Image (cartoon, rainbow, N blue to C red):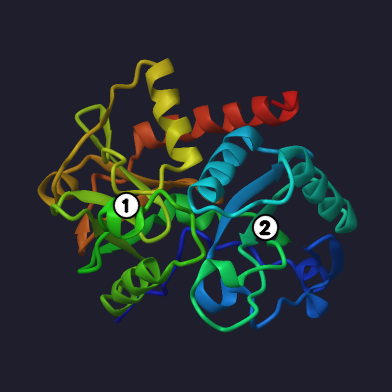
Amino acid sequence: MNQTSHTTHDSAEDERNRDIRIYVNGDIVHRDAAKVSVYDSGFMLGDGMWEGMRLHNGKWAFFDEHMDRFFASCKAVSIDVGMDRVGILDALTRTAAANDMTHDVHCRLMLTRGVKVKPFQHPSLSRSGPTLVIIMEHSRPVTELQSRGIRLATVPQVRGLPMSQDAKFNSHSKLNCVIACLQAEQAGADEALMLDPHGFVNTTNACNFFIVRKGEVWTSTGDYCMNGVTRAKVIELCRENDIPVREKNFSLYEAYGADEAFLTGTFGAQTPVAEIDGKSIGDGSCTITRRIRALYKNLLEANTRSGL
């Protein structure tokens, strides 16, 4: 009998989200009135970039790091953001205030190339400027996943080469990951474990992936995955706290035999992995994962208390 499926984005239901207000190009409107054109390049082609962010203690966690990635991605694909990061912060602040939100908030900041004059691919057809949408929800990760863990299934869909679609882009075009997620679900797992083009373990469809072997923390080289902000913070924390960490190629053989495995992401922080392809990972103690999670929690508090 199949277990109930979970994801790293599972959150407790919150009735307040039924009446959230959403930012759309400067206007802040009830979610039922928040709309973009069917001619928008994001809807039509997935032509846009986004960031997932957390509002914690009234401040945006690791704001500068998220903005570095966001603006670099937009520049790389020649999307004019239309404002600087001070303008983005003002839009975020206004939206949070309109929703009376200060803590346990997840935000999806989305920017597309804008509305097209004709329903075709060429970027020059987007002439009215970018479309900026900000969705904020009261959102707290469910605690069950910390004890239960996530079940992964290795899938045929891979994270491709940079010259096809560089996985470092946090783009609206997520079909590659959606297909992987469907493949994992059809295999009876919660999320997909995706390999790189050379067959090495890479990432999941939604999060970055780490294993622990004999006291060492391993993650992929970063060549074929979203170089996540939380991923980078975990690597930094390991280095600062004498936890051996390596960015390297490794195979499923080494992942199956890991003592621990965990996922990282802005929403779930660090989520333990219980099994991969039906094989249990470790003994469930997750000693190093729990230590990293505690270190990250302290870092998050320091970052948002100080406003860094």
Q: In the image, what residue occupies the spot 57% across and 46% down? A: 70
Residue 180 showing in the rendered view: yes
The spot of residue 243 in percent (x, y) is: 34, 21
Mark 2 Cα-neighbour bin, 10 Å: few <14, some 14–19, many ≥20: many
Q: Amino acid at mark 2?
A: Ser
From the viewer's perspective, tell me whether residue 158 is left or right of residue 60.
left
Q: Which mark is residue 179?
A: none
| 260, above or below 149, in the image | above
Dot 1: what SS? strand
CB atoms at circles 2 and 1 under 8 Å apart? no
Please tell me how crowded label 1 is: few (under 14), some (14-19), or many (20+) other residues with Cα within 10 Å: many
User: How far from the left and from the top, in percent, is residue 277?
Assistant: 20, 63
Q: Which residue occupies 33% across, 40% down?
A: 285
Return the residue nearer the eye: 201 or 90: 90
Question: In the rendered image, which quarter is residue 287 located in?
Answer: top left
**Relative side of 98 to 151, left or right:** right
Task: Give the structural element (helix, strand or loop) at label 2.
Answer: loop
Q: Which residue is mark 2?
A: 139
* Amino acid type at image mark 1: Thr
Q: Based on the displayed image, in which of its 4 quarters is residue 113 positioned?
A: bottom right
| Left or right placement of residue 207 versus residue 86 in this view | left
Residue 266 in sight in this render: no
- Residue at the limit of the structure toward the left, as seen here: 253
Compared to residue 175, the image places residue 200 above or below, namely above
Left or right: where does residue 241 sit relative to residue 68? left
Q: Residue at 71%, 45% (x, y): give it.
A: 55
Q: Which residue is mark 1?
A: 203
